[in-house]
Image (spheres, grey):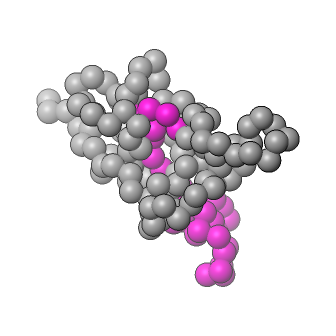
Amino acid sequence: MPTAKELHSIIDTTRVPALDPVFDLSDTAAYLWTSTTHLESPPPAAETAPFHARGELAIYFAAGPALGKVESPPGSGRRVWMDVHGAGAQRSDPKTATPGVWTEGFGPQGDDIRGANLAKCVRRAH
């Protein structure tokens, strides 16, 4: 899989999907895995620490909308899915997330945790 830097090199945030057109992507809402681990530091010693502190996150990019479940309108208590980051956004998902478990998202913007992101070859032949 590409590193975050490699995948970022073909991201074009002015279009949806946010990939160079040479890379066919029929799913404009796809999230694309990288091989880059996201580790918050310093890592805790305990196995009971949250997954985001144990190096269990992988960076991905949103080819289209980068969804989050947020309160809308503010103060209403009603949470809805909306594009909170936009095409080309870089985020991270647990490497072993089970799809469908994170129904309310994760973090302050309720980031969509899919756990079944796509892998896409990004190296061009020279």
Secondary structure that dominates the magenta span: loop
Residue 12 rendering spot, x and y as whole percentages: 41, 23
Q: Is residue 39 visible?
A: no
Q: Is residue 65 at least partly visible in the picture? A: yes
* Residue 74 pos. (x, y %): 81, 37
Residue 66 x %, y %: 52, 38
Instruction: Tell me where residue 18 sits by quadrant.
Output: top left
User: Which residue is farthest top?
Assistant: 14
Q: What residue do we see at 45% from left, 18% from top?
A: 14
Identified at 61% across, 54% down, the residue is 105
At 68% from the left and 53% from the top, the residue drawn is: 107
Examine the rendered structure and indicate whether residue 16 appears above or below residue 59.
above
Q: Which residues are the magenta region?
A: 37-66
Q: Quadrant of residue 20?
A: top left
* In the image: residue 69, left or right of residue 26: right
Percent x, y of residue 104: 63, 55
In this rendering, position of residue 94 left or right of residue 43 = left
Residue placed furthest toward the right:
75
User: Does the magenta-highlighted stretch encompass residue 81?
Assistant: no
Quadrant for the C terminus, please.
Answer: top left
> Which residue is located at x 65 percent, y 80 percent?
48
Q: Is residue 59 magenta?
A: yes
Above or below — where is 106 with respect to 86? Answer: below
Q: Is residue 106 left or right of residue 6?
A: right
Q: Is residue 21 left or right of residue 103?
A: left
